[in-house]
Amino acid sequence: MKIIIDQRSRNRRASIPFFCLYHVGIKKGRRINKRRSGAGAAYVDSYAPHLVLCTIAIVLLSAMDALLTLNILARGGTELNIFMTILMEDSTEKFVHFKLALTSLALIFLIIHHNHQLIAKLQVRHLLYLILFGYLTLIGYEVALLTISSS
């Protein structure tokens, strides 16, 4: 009878870096599409945490955009979006509710189709990151407008 001794080291894997292209979906892992049966996008009912976090951040930034827009308008600014101007003339509550509802519905559609390939290597999930970057830029611009108007 031969006794086999386990000589494997437990710490074989490298530590996970703080930021990795695999985490944001830019670089695919080794086993992508191995378990999928067929071509095209796969629809799931559980989404990656980074997608959920990105979606929540976009909704919060959209709400912040609505509040900053109302502050800018109170200081004498003008709304350039004609549709939103019509909503604001009716009531500010309707403007905020419609803006958040429209943003949320668009995000739901985008996150459902997050694996869908648009062109070349551009997937819908990359659009979510672009929207997040766009909202961050917009919030920065609105904060700059408010600081200029207050001085």
Image (spheres, grey):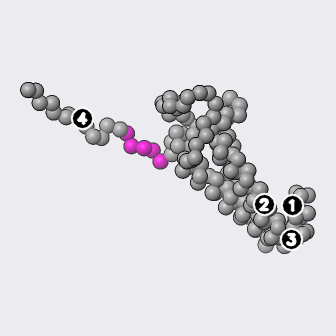
Please state the horizontal and vertical placement of residue 52, each as a whole percent of the image. 59, 52
The dominant secondary structure in magenta is loop
| CB-based contact (under 8 Å), mark 4 and mark 3 | no
Mark carried by residue 99: 2
Is the residue marked by circle 4 packed among few (<14), some (14-19), or many (20+) residues within 10 Å?
few
Task: Give how far apart the Cα atoms at labels 4 and 2 are.
Answer: 57 Å
Residue type at numbered disc 2: Lys
Residue type at numbered disc 1: Met
- Magenta-tinted stretch: 14-18
Question: Would you say 28 lies left or right of 143 here?
Answer: left
Mark carried by residue 84: 1
Q: Residue at x 39, y 43 (%)?
A: 15
Give the mark, 3 or 2, whose residue is nearer the N terminus.
3
Q: Quadrant of the N terminus?
A: top left
Say which element carries label 2: helix
Q: Quadrant of the C terminus?
A: bottom right
Q: 86 and 41: which one is in front?
A: 41
Mark carried by residue 8: 4
Give the mark, 4 or 2, whose residue is nearer the N terminus.
4
Residue type at numbered disc 3: Ser
